[in-house]
């Protein structure tokens, strides 16, 4: 896997550790982190929108494998609702963390 391939920044429903454990069948390591340049919004689901000067607080999940990403991609309804993109989060200690993040696939722009 690539350097950021086993990490995922989460900011919505996946912040719930019990939900993650049910989905993945185990507890995964998570650490508080911040993603700069986005703000969290909500329509039917939480999503991130680019916004200069903003940030989103969430967590970075560590130690995820291909099977975990298959489960999470299905949960996030990739590619219908979200796509998985590369990002750089910052830990509470200021360390840069290369990771994945789920970004909306266009539904957030639809009227209604």
Image (cartoon, rainbow, N blue to C red):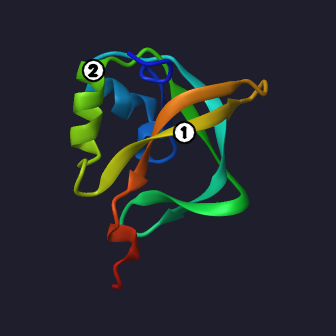
Q: Secondary structure at mark 1?
A: strand
Q: Is residue 72 left or right of residue 61?
A: left
Q: Secondary structure at mark 2?
A: helix
| Image quadrant containing the N terminus | top left
* Residue 53 coordinates in the image, percent (x, y): 76, 59
Q: Earlier in the sequence, mark 1 or mark 2?
A: 2
Q: Is residue 87 above or below residue 78?
A: above
Q: Nearer the viewer, residue 19 or 28?
A: 28
Q: Is residue 50 left or right of residue 84?
A: right
Distance Cα–Cα, label 1 vs label 2:
18 Å
Q: Is residue 29 left or right of residue 79?
A: right
Q: Residues within 10 Å of mark 1 (few under 14, many from 20)?
A: some
Q: Nearer the viewer, residue 73 or 75?
A: 73
Q: Residue at x 36, y 30 (%)?
A: 20
Say which quarter of the image contains residue 19. top left
Residue behind mark 1:
87
Q: Nearer the viewer, residue 84 or 18?
A: 84
* Residue 50 coordinates in the image, percent (x, y): 58, 61
Q: Is residue 5 above or below residue 59?
A: above
Q: Residue at x 30, y 28 (%)?
A: 69
The total of numbered circles placed on residues is 2
Q: Residue at x 21, y 40 (%)?
A: 74
Residue behind mark 2:
66
Say which quarter of the image contains residue 14. top left
Q: Mark 1 touching mark 2, by CB under 8 A?
A: no
* Residue 71 coordinates in the image, percent (x, y): 23, 31
Q: Residue at x 44, y 29 (%)?
A: 17
| Image quadrant containing the C terminus | bottom left
């Amino acid at each position: 896997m690539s350097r950021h391939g086993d990490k995922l920044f989460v900011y919505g429903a996946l912040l719930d550790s019990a939900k993650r454990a049910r989905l993945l069948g185990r507890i995964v390591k998570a650490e508080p982190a911040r993603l700069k340049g986005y703000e969290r919004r909500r329509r039917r689901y939480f999503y991130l929108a680019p916004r200069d000067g903003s940030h989103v607080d969430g967590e970075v999940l560590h130690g995820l494998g291909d099977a975990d990403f298959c489960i999470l991609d299905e949960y996030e309804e990739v590619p219908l609702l979200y796509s998985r993109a590369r990002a750089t989060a910052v830990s509470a200690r200021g360390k840069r963390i290369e990771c994945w993040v789920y970004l909306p696939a266009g539904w957030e722009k639809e009227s209604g």
